[in-house]
Amino acid sequence: MTFSKNLIIEGKHDRPILTDVFYDENSTRKPIVVFCHGYKGFKDWGAWDLMGKAFSEAGFLFIKFNFSHNGGTVKQPIDFPDLEAFGNNNYTKELDDLETIIDWVYDNTIFKTEGDLSNISLIGHSRGGGIVTIKAEEDNRIKKVISLAGVSSYGQRTSTTGDLDQWKKDGVKYVLNGRTKQQMPHFYQFYEDFIANEKRLTIKRAVTNLKIPYLIIHGEGDTSVLIKEACNLHKWNPKSQLEIIDGADHVFGAKHPWAENYIPHQLNEAIQIMVNFISASE
């Protein structure tokens, strides 16, 4: 298996996008899967490396990356050493980053021999579930899309809501990272960007208009993004496939750091469902 780590892709917002690629180098064109992490997430979180290897072993070319403003840096891609960047992140920047990765896939010679450019799927975890759904609805290069414990509305997230008058007055509000204990800043530009692009950023609109196969996977025990959000997504797109994994939490039994050399069984179940979904003929 070929595993390329921390490739530097130039983003549209003057910050690099660190990217990992997993595939079996055999000159066979493989389905391409692009994975987007969620809020307060990063590509090296928990068991995501093991997930990349599992997709590679199943015959896919798997790509995961850090959003350019997720708070990581080139030298320290794990966790959040750059809180200034984190505070300047927003949904449209994440959509731009994902577009940059898709464009990079199309322009990279490796993917012309090892990847099937006519078969690109997106997976988004948590907040990333909305990002991939919006991008899939507006980009006809995407053939399938998967929401993994994904959100159903950006307008209702804590990063978007709150005391707007105080937020505007202060220019920043803070959200505690329970794991790192950092106070994570959200500059008021986050809200301004959301309002300016609210129609595009309405997940319900994107889900309703999807014309490609759509898989929704959710943990029955998810307390971070409640299962009703998965039910909403399925209701808005009745042709979608909804899979509920018994007892699974928001991260399907994983945690960070994940020191084990095996995939937790609930995440493994989710991976097998995703592999079968992408592999199935339409």
Image (cartoon, rainbow, N blue to C red):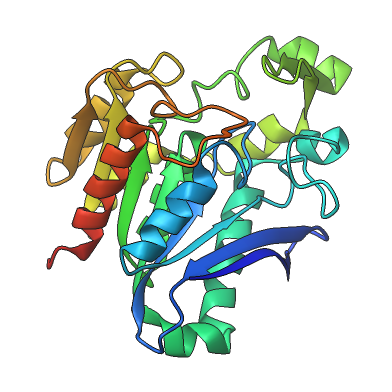
Drawn side of residue 82 relative to residue 195, left or right: right
Q: Could you tell me if residue 42 is visible in this image?
A: yes
Q: What percent of the width, then of the height, locates residue 80?
A: 78, 35
Q: How many marks?
A: 0
Decide if residue 1 is on the left or right side of residue 80. left
On the rendered structure, is 221 left or right of 224?
Answer: left
User: Relative to 5, does residue 163 appear above or below in the rendering?
Assistant: above
Q: Is residue 121 visible?
A: no
In the rendered view, tell whether residue 150 sits above or below residue 107.
above
Depth order, front residue of 215/205: 215
Position of residue 225 measured from the top left corner of the image (x, y, whole percent): 42, 21
Say which of 94 and 43 sits in front: 43
Q: Picture quarter containing residue 263?
A: top left
Name the spot of residue 190 as percent of width and height, x first.
Answer: 70, 34
Question: Which residue is at 56% across, 36% downward?
Answer: 46
Q: Hey, which quadrant is residue 276 in on the image?
A: bottom left
Tell me: 131 left or right of 171.
left
Q: Position of residue 27 (x, y in %)?
A: 41, 89
Task: Quarter of the image for the C terminus: give it.
Answer: bottom left
- Residue furthest to the front in view is 261
Q: Quadrant of residue 275?
A: bottom left
